Image (tube, rainbow, N blue to C red):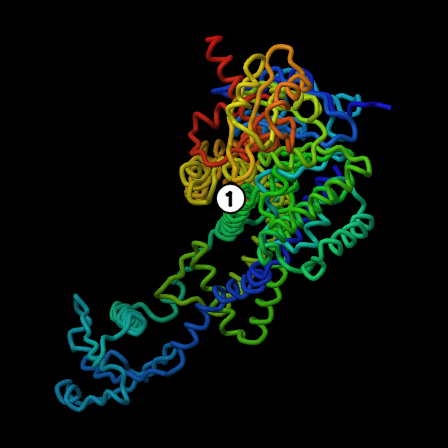
Amino acid sequence: MNQTILQINDVVKRYASHTALDKVSIDVPTGSIFGLLGPNGAGKTSLIRIINQITGPDEGSIFLNGEKLKPQHTELIGYLPEERGLYKKMEVGEQALYLAQLKGMKKAEAMKRLKVWFEKFEIIPWWKKKVEELSKGMQQKVQFIVTVIHEPPLLILDEPFSGFDPINANLIKDELIGLSKNGSTIILSTHRMESVEELCSHIALINQSKKILEGTVKEVRNTYKSNIFEIEYIGNNIAFANGLWTGFELIETIAHEDHTIARVKLLQNKSTNDLLNAILPHANVLGFKEIIPGMNDIFIRAVQENKQEQSMAK
Amino acid sequence: MNKIALIIKREFLTRVRKKSFIIMTLVGPLLIGLVFLAPIMIMEMSDDEEKLIKVVDEAHLFREDIPKSKKILFERDTMPIETAKKIFDSEKYTALLYIPSNILTPPHKAILYSEKQANIEITSAVERLLQKEIENAKMIANNINEEMLESIRTRVDVNAVKITETGEQKSSAGIVSIVGIVSSLVIYMFIFLYGAMVMRGVIEEKTSRIVEVIISSVKPFQLLMGKIIGIAMVGLTQFILWVALSLLVTTAVQSIFLDKDLLTQKTEQINSISGHTIDENNPVSSGGNEEIVAEIFDSLSSINFIHVFLVFIFYFLGGYLLYSALFGAIGAAVDNETDTQQFMLPITVPLILGIVVAQSIISNPDSSLAFWFSIIPFTSPVVMMVRLPFGVPLSELLLSMSLLVLGFLFTTWIASRIYRVGILMYGKKVSYKELGKWLFYKG
């Protein structure tokens, strides 16, 4: 079995005034939900457009299922662009049918599957309506359906939750999980880190046209783990602080009505057991946990570190 | 290929089902019928009432009753002109014609009194009448009798005959140029109307952002070609429906409204348009009319209609394809229709130039001006159609046609390169320099 559905090798894309992608290589594992992250203007859209063969790379190559990207591959990909769009004057059902056929589906088959999706999303009554008569959320639903209708092995979704209310966002999220379980690989480009944490198994971070981070969410988090622990306790704060005299750094203490929360960083080779041994004589510990950085923090730190490195290099 | 067919189908169906298309298709022939009918209706209306003119003939110019001319009746009165003026009954008479006794000596002046300003029709009818009568009187005074007079009056008719390989063919410059100019105007309008439709279609896809979804399924070139071909089919459909409905409407109109009399008048009209001068003093007899009708049919048959029609369809489509690709490129380069102005100029100038040249070369369809403009692809669709009915050497026609095909391939190449970059470019005012750069972007 091929473990990598999409292999991006040293892709370079230059525009007249700047380089959008600078030797970017990413492997997207089959069956993963892959978060493609990066600040605005980092080059995500350029990369997505290259994968969709909307534009071509200046250098580098891309393999889908081990084959070099070719025009027929567009039928294996479902693409939801960030800027949504449908023909406003066209009827919803007719339009969905048209877009499904453009993806290579037979008319009858497309019709059958569309009916199922329309029913699932409760928009059957809108089949004969023009797109411009629909609310924005409803248009988004139609757009989502036409993206997944041909059941592509690879889905590329750019900000799939924008424009949805929380209920419909959940509906889409559940559909994505369902599609993933059925074997689809999903590339998710988003700025909403909570959905990355919730959905993604792998991520790649692009900043200033370079990939600066790639791996499973777990790996990435472990890399950015900073050995900080949160201790909830009752006891004398001064005695507590004295106990952490060597080998630890007390970052902050927050006093609550009947207890205190302290954040402590392990220094040198100290282990969590060392920390516990140091504080147990001075405090009645109520809770103890490691602070694992959220994707949000990782994102910000990675981008800032990258910035510093670059300014140092200059 | 299958996907282009899908795109063509969508472009065609969405437009043909639009209310505006259906309305235009139905109203168009009515408008054409109206244009055809309006002069006849106007003539009919103004001719409705008979006009009565009182004549005081002091010169005794008319010995017998004054002949009725068209719808004007003359009534003689012997009372002196001063009295006649006083008792002039404007209810009954349209005008009072005073022929002074010195009418036979220059400057041959008569006076037409009327309450309202006498219209040109009446004035010229009276002038013709007097002129003829005075001439007759003078000739008789000079001992020229009626028989001699008749034998002197001459009507000259020059028949243009084209020598072709198959033999001689009668031709009439007038009719031939009408066929030419009408078809070139149709091509001109078609290019503008449907080229702009391609442009608006591209802008619509760009501003609604659906274009990114579509070009993730098909190549931008396929989308552009599908759109151009689809809209060409819309245009052809509309054109064919117009021709069919117009024929229907005009035949219906003719059979309902036109009696034979009016038909003759109409042929006279066509004659005067086509450059036949009608001798004003000598209104053509009914025999002459028949001759002219026969002549029209003769010269119409001198045009090889199948040939003209096939060439017309070729230039109709060729011209449209050449320009619509460029229109599409413009649509891709801008964000909304108001920004299209700056790029429209290079497209409109050759077309308008073509129409201007077309009108001037009717009089000389074999000039070198006509030759060059009918060879250059940007003007040839408009100009060649004017030349064609006069006969164009096959070699020139083939040269022009193949250059048009090459021109089409060239503009489509340019357009598709601008298009594929432009459709993904938002919120940027584009300059010509920028467009030039787009041509050389890599896929």
Q: Amino acid at mark 1?
A: Val
Extreme-right residue of the structure: A1
Q: Residue at x 56, y 42 (%)?
A: B202
Number of other residues with Cα within 10 Å of mark 1, as a class: few under 14, some 14 to 19, many 20 or more: many
Where is residue B257 drawn, in percent x and y? 53, 75
Q: Residue at x 49, y 65 (%)?
A: B36
| Callout 1: SS | helix
Whether residue A200 is visible to the viewer of this picture, yes or no, is yes
- Chain ID, mark 1: B
Instruction: Tell me where residue A91 sits by quadrant.
Output: bottom right
> In the visual, does A74 lie left or right of B279?
right
Where is residue B212 drawn, in percent x and y? 61, 37
Instruction: Tell me where residue B144 sits by quadrant.
Output: bottom left
Tag 1 residue: B386
Relative to the observer, which residue lies in front, A11 or B410? Answer: A11
> In the visual, does A68 lie left or right of B249?
right
Up-down relation of residue A133 to residue A244 (above or below) = below
Whether residue B224 is visible to the viewer of this picture, yes or no, is no
Extreme-left residue of the structure: B82
Quarter placement of the N terminus of chain B: top right
Where is residue B16 drawn, in percent x and y? 63, 56
> In the visual, does A286 lie left or right of B181?
right
